[in-house]
Image: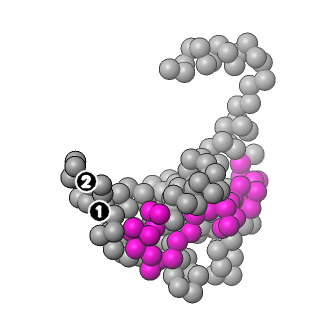
Amino acid sequence: MPHSILVSKLMHVPQDWPMLRGDADVSQAIKILRIVTEDRKLEHGHSTPIVLDNDGKLTGFLHLTDLLRNIRHLCEKTDAPCELHRATTPIKNLSRPFVESVTPEDSILKALDIMMDHGVSLVPVMKDGKLQGIIQLSDIFNTVAALLFDEQNPEQRRWLVRRFHL
């Protein structure tokens, strides 16, 4: 059951997650995220980068909407390209701190409680003050859904999809 599944079983290691230094500006961050997303073929959901200080310590995460909000006014001219070079705000000014963390040995339900209590979909996994990984809501959902409902009957699966999937 979910209470016995450890965070370590679902977490993404930091190397598999987009990470940015807080002193990068918005223009640099957008370019880096584009490169990293293409190079690593990141799945949907891996696009919320985490932000580190110059010493490699976790400071928070960055919503893509905050990046785009910061450049929106630079893209209003219809007869010219976006003036991305003017997006010089350091991303540390846009990043949001993580409210809590879990350890690799915690239950995924602890991570889920943090997500539900604070309306977030990512929780850092820390051990001895060091980032060990990231756990995301979609991974917890998929795991719990598989435990609670793993319909093997092909006819029942087709009926569910026909009946309730739009």
Task: Give the mark count.
Answer: 2
Across and down, in percent, residue 91 comes to 41, 72
The structure's colour scheme is: one colour
**In which quarter of the view is residue 17 placed?**
bottom right
Secondary structure beneath dot 2 equals: loop
Placement of 139 over or under 161, stated as above or below? below
Left or right for 87, reference 126: left
Residue with the mark numbered 1: 83
Kind of residue sitting beneath label 2: Ala
Question: In the current view of this chain or complex, which residue is farthest to the bottom?
Answer: 55
Across and down, in percent, residue 131 comes to 64, 74
Q: Is residue 17 magenta?
A: yes
Q: Residue at x 45, y 76 (%)?
A: 24
Across and down, in percent, residue 33 comes to 51, 61
Query: What is the magenta range?
Result: 2-31
Residue 117 at least partly seen: no
Kind of residue sitting beneath label 1: Glu
Q: Residue at x 58, y 61 (%)?
A: 36
Residue with the mark numbered 2: 80
| 125 or 47: nearer the viewer | 47
Q: Are marks 1 and 2 in contact (CB under 8 Å)?
A: yes
Left or right for 64, reference 150: left
